Amino acid sequence: MKVRNSLRSLKNRHRDCRVVRRKGRVYVINKTHRKFKARQG
């Protein structure tokens, strides 16, 4: 899990990436490739 300031570029790494908001934090999750996980803040 990477912690980043901006998640927009990480969303474009793979076409299955999704930006999700949970408990005030913003996450990038990917069901098919688990390595593309990131969190903001």
Image: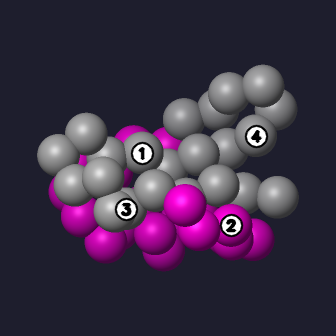
Residue receiving disc 4: 25
Which of the 4 quarters of the picture holds residue 33? bottom left
Cα distance between the residues tagged 1 and 3 = 7 Å
Q: Which residue is mark 3?
A: 36
Tell me the amino acid under the disc marked 3: Phe
Residue under numbered circle 2: 3
Q: Which residue is at 17% across, 46% downward?
A: 32
Residue 9 among those drawn in magenta: yes
Labels 2 and 1: the sequence-earlier one:
2
Where's residue 14, x and y in %? 24, 64
Task: Please report contact status of discs 1 and 3: CB closer than 8 Å, yes or no.
Answer: yes
What SS does tag 1 mark?
A: strand
What's the CA distance linking mark 2 and mark 3?
Answer: 11 Å
How many neighbours does mark 3 have within 10 angstroms: few (below 14), some (14-19), or many (20 or more)?
some
Residue type at mark 4? Arg
> Is residue 8 left or right of 4 when viewed as pictured?
left
